[in-house]
Amino acid sequence: MLKLSKKTEYGILAIRHISMLGTNRVATVKEVALENNIPQPLLAKILQQLVKERMIRSVQGSHGGYVMDRDVSEITLADVVEAIEGPIRLTECGAPGGSCERINICDLKDSLEPVQAQLYDFFKKLKLIDVLNLQQQVKSA
């Protein structure tokens, strides 16, 4: 079954939480974790991955935490999935550098390539603001 991982779900929930605070308020790991029932240590790692991909930004200091680094309307579902999970692939052998002991006798990768391309395109076109229905909820600066 194809499904988003818990880590990806948590990343999306964190982005939703941070984006709804607007640009004037910083979200802490503890706040996001408590509000969304996410284990803090795991959330901290996920947030660092989102910082690395410049979706959110870390604010240092005694009142530090996280704020959006990009407008949520510019972030796609593919951006979040790839930041947390790596390339979007239907099969392990379809991943760059993927290996399989049946490579000489199996053409599954080639058969699924058109589906793979459509899935990636769909994820890349799907903006988080639409997925989360945030257009009416995001606070302005």
Image (cartoon, helix red, strand yellow):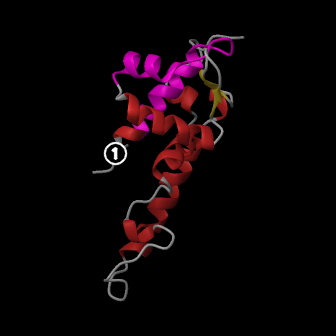
Q: Is residue 65 left or right of residue 116?
A: right
- Residue 26 forms part of the magenta stretch: yes
Residues drawn in magenta: 8-37
Residue under label 1, please give it: 3
Residue under the point 33% across and 81% down: 106
Number of marks drawn: 1
Q: Nearer the viewer, residue 133 or 38?
A: 38
Give the residue at the far right of this rendering: 141
Secondary structure mostly seen in magenta is helix
Would residue 133 be visible to someone looking at this image?
no
Residue at (37%, 64%) from the top-left corner?
A: 91
Query: Which residue lies at the image location 48% right of the left edge and 27% below the top edge?
Result: 14
Residue at coordinates 64% horizontally, 14% vertically from top-left? 22
Q: Is residue 135 above or below residue 76?
A: above
Residue, far bottom: 104
Q: Residue furthest front?
A: 62
Q: Is residue 76 magenta?
A: no
9 to 16, vertically: above or below = below
Looking at the image, is 3 positioned above or below residue 25? below
- Helix, strand, or loop for circle 1? loop
Q: Position of residue 50 (x, y in %)?
A: 56, 38
Q: Is residue 137 above or below residue 16?
A: above
What is the three-letter code of the residue carrying label 1? Answer: Lys
Q: Outermost residue, left direction?
A: 1
Q: Where in the figure is residue 51, as x and y percent of width and height?
A: 61, 37
Task: From the top left corner, tell me how far across and down residue 139 is, in percent.
Answer: 63, 10
Question: How dense is the environment of label 1, judged by Cα within 10 Å: few (below 14), some, or many (20 and up)?
Answer: few
In the rendered image, the quadrant that contains the C terminus is top right
Is residue 97 among the parts visible in the rendering? yes
- Indicate the position of residue 37 as horizontal and vertical percent values: 33, 22
